[in-house]
Amino acid sequence: MAKARVNSKFRENIRIKRDEPIVTAVDVRPCAQPGCKEEGAFRVPKSRDELSRYTWLCLAHARAHNESWDYFKGMSERDIESFRNDAVTGHRPTWPLGKRAARLHNPLGAFHFDEHFGGEPGEAPKPHRPERQVTRVQLTAFDTLNLEPSATLNEIKARYKELVKRFHPDANGGDRGAEERLKQVIKAYGVLRASGLT
């Protein structure tokens, strides 16, 4: 079988020194454990505070290190709970929903803005009217607060605050009628909260 000839303008410029060894010896990293003569082929973090800095250990010492490793050692219960809560979001900052919403810049009018975005950019967003199926108890609660069942979350909360201020005994000189009405308002709001509408 004939060898295929390689036609390359660089073929003549390639020089290989035949006296150089093809495989060079790799430096062997020793285990960081004092007195150990094994190769340190496994990296382990130095400490909880220096997770990006490593110590190189042999297999036996790396295994022993991993078995005794306790990330939370020396932390209080409050610190551990705080770490667990932050781990839910990957230890990244979060903001309340809607506080940092980005507005879409639409200089050419290429995008259609519906009622969820408040029409064109710069307009105040229109409240989203939820369509919900309500029970008789929930309907009574809405009637007590003098609201429609399609009221938004903010409207429910605002009406509750308004009625509590209006019927509070301190604002009505201890009037029993106002006190009874306040109890009804609190009960109605409790029904809506328990049903997940607020």
Image (tube, grey):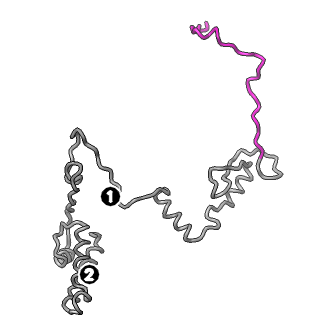
Q: Nearer the viewer, residue 185 or 161?
A: 161
Nearer mark to the viewer, of 2 and 1: 1
- State the SS at label 1: loop
Q: Nearer the viewer, residue 9 or 92?
A: 92
The dot on residue 137 is none
Disc 1 residue crowd, few under 14, some 14–19, many 20+, Cα 10 Å? few
Q: Position of residue 64 (x, y in %)?
A: 72, 57
The answer to whether residue 104 is above or below residue 160 is above
Quarter in which the N terminus is drawn: top right
Magenta stretch, residue numbers: 1-30
- Is residue 12 one of those drawn in magenta? yes
Residue highlighted by disc 1? 98
**Residue 196 appears left or right of 1:** left
The type of residue carrying mark 1 is Gly
The dot on residue 186 is 2
Q: Position of residue 151 (x, y in %)?
A: 20, 67
The type of residue carrying mark 2 is Ile
Residue at left offset 21%, top offset 92%: 175
- Is residue 100 one of those drawn in magenta? no
Q: Position of residue 101 (x, y in %)?
A: 33, 54
